[in-house]
Image (tube, rainbow, N blue to C red):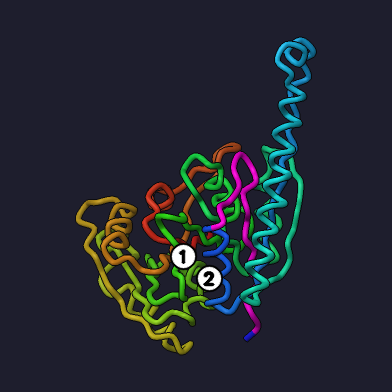
């Protein structure tokens, strides 16, 4: 089986992705038999064309300074990545790109379309990386793996346990298919269904998933939780917080309204409460 072709997004504005996050991504790629490339996008900031404001507060100079910082972040992060990836034998490409500040997420999504997986570390809810996660999940046609270094860390030595969320939907089936190369590396897999949530998630919904995985040589067990009126996202986050699997796999739900993409309830909740690394697929 050929190695996974994985892309790591390195944030370059307003702060750089941490060395800790890069190290975790590199080790994850090695543990799943992947080749890891990294992309760092230098931001292009276009200040408003206002002569008075430029004269009074120096908007052009401020923009140029922020661009310089972003360029330096790209260079430093890619240097760290190259060193660590070469050391573990997973080095693919180190890509230094440039894009308008407001289209970085869409640019990363476009570059992810020819990869098996895109990894996006999220240091905090305010660092802009969540927008990249959403853009890749809904705009690339490929899965995205997100984690929070220092909180929801990637496992240091492979995936012992994986939880696959299953509700019988097309999106859940897509997530399962996209996760198959990783599921093959897991020691223990639980197919989790929240019952009494929708018609497709009655008792026994996960049994055919266990059969399907078994047909591909992957051992799994099915587990059901009665939603009991709780939101599915809350049930998921409570479950993974208690079990602490190495990875949580789920279909990403959402719909477009005008130019804004609105996330489904469970997806929105899990992206705000990331207790473990998550693989999302749409």
Of residues 193 and 90, the one nearer the viewer is 90
Q: Residue at x 38, y 67 (%)?
A: 166
Q: Quadrant of residue 181?
A: bottom right
Residue 7 belongs to the span the image colors magenta:
yes
* Left-right relation of 191 to 114: left
Q: Determine the secondary structure under disc 2.
A: helix
Q: Residue at x 64, y 69 (%)?
A: 85
The residue range painted magenta reads 2-19
The residues bearing labels 1 and 2 have C-alpha atoms spaced at a distance of 7 Å
Q: Determine the secondary structure under disc 1.
A: loop
Residue 219 belongs to the span the image colors magenta:
no
Q: Are marks 1 and 2 in contact (CB under 8 Å)?
A: yes
- Indicate which disc residue 28 carries: 2
Of residues 258 and 58, the one nearer the viewer is 58
Q: Where is residue 128 drawn, in percent x and y?
A: 56, 42
Inspect this view and state whether residue 137 appears: no
Residue 70's place in the image compared with 37, above or below, is: above
Q: Residue at x 52, y 64 (%)?
A: 24
Packing grade of label 1 (10 A; few <14, some 14-19, many >=20) is: many
**Among the two numbered marks 1 and 2 on one chain, the one whose residue lies closer to the N terminus:** 2
- Indicate which disc residue 154 carries: 1
Inspect this view and state whether residue 41 appears: yes
């Amino acid at each position: 089986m050929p190695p996974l072709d994985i892309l790591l997004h390195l944030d370059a504005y307003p702060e750089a992705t941490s060395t800790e996050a890069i190290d975790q991504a590199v080790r994850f790629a090695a543990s799943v038999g992947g080749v890891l490339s990294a992309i760092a996008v230098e931001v292009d900031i276009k200040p408003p064309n206002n002569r008075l404001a430029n004269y009074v507060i120096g908007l052009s100079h401020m923009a140029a300074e922020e661009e310089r910082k972003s360029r330096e972040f790209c260079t430093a992060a890619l240097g760290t990545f190259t060193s660590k990836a070469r050391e573990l034998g997973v080095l693919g490409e180190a890509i230094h790109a440039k894009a308008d500040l407001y289209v970085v997420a869409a640019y990363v999504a476009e570059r992810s379309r020819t990869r098996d997986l895109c990894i996006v570390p999220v240091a905090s809810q305010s660092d802009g990386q969540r927008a990249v996660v959403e853009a890749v999940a809904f705009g690339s046609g490929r899965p995205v793996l997100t984690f929070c270094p220092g909180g929801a860390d990637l496992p240091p030595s492979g995936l012992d346990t994986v939880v696959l969320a299953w509700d019988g939907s097309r999106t859940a089936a897509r997530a399962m298919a996209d996760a198959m190369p990783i599921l093959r590396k897991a020691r223990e897999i639980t197919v989790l269904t929240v019952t009494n949530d929708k018609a497709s998630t009655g008792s026994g919904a996960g049994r055919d998933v266990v059969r399907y995985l078994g047909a591909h040589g992957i051992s799994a067990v099915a587990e059901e939780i009665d939603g009991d009126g709780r939101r599915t996202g809350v049930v998921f986050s409570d479950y993974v917080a208690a079990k602490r699997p190495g990875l949580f796999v789920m279909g990403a739900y959402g719909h477009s309204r005008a130019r804004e993409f609105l996330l489904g309830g469970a997806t929105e909740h899990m992206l705000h409460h990331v207790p473990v690394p998550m693989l999302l697929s749409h």
